[in-house]
């Protein structure tokens, strides 16, 4: 494992925030900036995205002003195998921010969804710029957090929730952003074993019966752990242990 995470960024590391009224996708905007040589630490926030991107080629839709939609540019000295630790840091930072600002504890569904009351509160999408030599040039970590009740389309109402729904009071997106950046600076400086320990402790997926839809096909079993790189360890009914680095998890008996 590399030395990454120990770059001296620390809590409150000086991120540079650009807040846009509208953009197609904050991830697209920051990826383009990364390609043009922007240093790490750029944070782009948007009130509205016209073509927000979700995981696995999905779209991410939210009413204008209803969500905290942002992307962070990182240039970690990590290999491609270690990138899950970057997105785990982003998800954990938002768990901390939600706790500080909205006063409740969200949990994580592997790989990086935030859940509250068993419903989706936020999702993380990381996109990577990899050079021809296989070196990671940039990671753009995007996160969308449902803040107000109208944050998600009606067809997702049974699966989604929002900070204000759980907290029962108004939650300011700027305060949530400020708290998130303090936690993120801290997590980017956390040694990997501590980061993985925190990730493991926050993962509601561990102990659950799951189906994981993987590129290699679906697999069912009990999620028993995460490995040192954040991969999900699943024990199948046949008794084999499989470690999964990419996929979509369904909790078969959600808590
Ligand atoms: C998921 O599918 O759960 C991940 C969704 C990530 C959405 C965020 S919103 C801000 C950033 N910009 C995008 O286009 N997507 C991410």
Image (cartoon, helix red, strand yellow):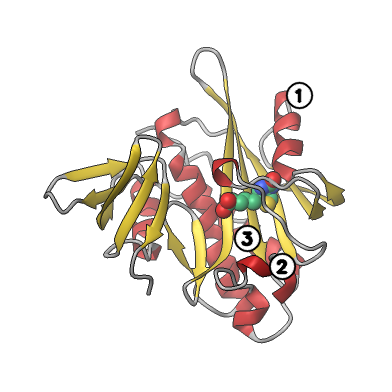
Residue 200 placed where, x, y %?
34, 58
Q: Are marks 3 and 1 in contact (CB under 8 Å)?
A: no
Disc 3 residue crowd, few under 14, some 14–19, many 20+, Cα 10 Å: many
Side of 183 relative to 242 (left or right): right
Quadrant of the image occupied by residue 172: bottom right
Disc 2 residue crowd, few under 14, some 14–19, many 20+, Cα 10 Å: many
Quadrant the N terminus occupies? top left
Q: Are marks 1 and 2 in contact (CB under 8 Å)?
A: no
Q: Secondary structure at mark 2?
A: helix
**In the displayed structure, would residue 122 be above or below residue 7?**
below
Residue at 61% in and 46% down = 58
Q: Are marks 2 and 3 in contact (CB under 8 Å)?
A: no
Residue position for label 2: 151
Residue position for label 3: 180
**In the displayed structure, would residue 73 be above or below residue 232?**
above
Side of 201 relative to 185 (left or right): left
Q: Is mark 2 within 8 Å of ligand 1?
A: no
* Total number of numbered discs in the rendering: 3
Q: Residue furthest right?
A: 21
Q: Residue furthest left?
A: 239
Residue position for label 1: 36
Side of 22 relative to 174 (left or right): right
Side of 86 relative to 68 (left or right): left
Q: Secondary structure at mark 1?
A: loop
Residue at 46% in and 31% down = 78
Query: How much space separates mark 1 and mark 2, taking CA atoms?
Result: 32 Å
Q: Residue 9, can we see it? A: no
């Amino acid at each position: 494992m590399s030395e990454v995470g120990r770059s001296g960024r620390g809590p409150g590391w000086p991120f540079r925030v650009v807040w846009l009224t509208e953009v197609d996708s904050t991830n697209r905007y920051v990826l383009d900036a990364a390609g043009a040589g922007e240093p790490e630490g750029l944070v782009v926030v948007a009130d509205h995205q016209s073509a927000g991107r979700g995981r696995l080629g999905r779209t991410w839709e939210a009413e204008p002003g209803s969500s905290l939609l942002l992307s962070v540019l990182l240039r970690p000295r990590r290999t491609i195998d270690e990138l899950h630790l970057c997105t785990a840091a982003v998800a954990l930072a938002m768990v901390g921010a939600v706790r500080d600002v909205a006063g409740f504890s969200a949990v994580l569904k592997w790989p990086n969804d935030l859940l509250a009351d068993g419903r989706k509160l936020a999702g993380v999408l990381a996109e990577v710029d990899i050079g021809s030599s296989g070196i990671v040039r940039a990671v753009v970590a995007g996160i969308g957090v449902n803040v107000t009740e109208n944050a998600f389309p009606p067809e997702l109402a049974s699966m989604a929730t929002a900070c204000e729904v759980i907290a029962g009071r108004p939650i300011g997106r700027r305060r949530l952003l400020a708290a998130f950046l303090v936690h993120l600076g801290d997590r980017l400086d956390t040694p990997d074993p501590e980061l993985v320990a925190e990730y493991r402790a926050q993962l509601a997926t561990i102990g659950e019966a799951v189906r994981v839809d993987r590129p290699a096909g679906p697999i069912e079993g009990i999620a028993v752990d995460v490995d040192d790189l954040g991969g999900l360890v699943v024990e199948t009914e046949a008794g084999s242990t499989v470690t999964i680095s990419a996929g979509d998890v369904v909790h078969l008996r959600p808590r």
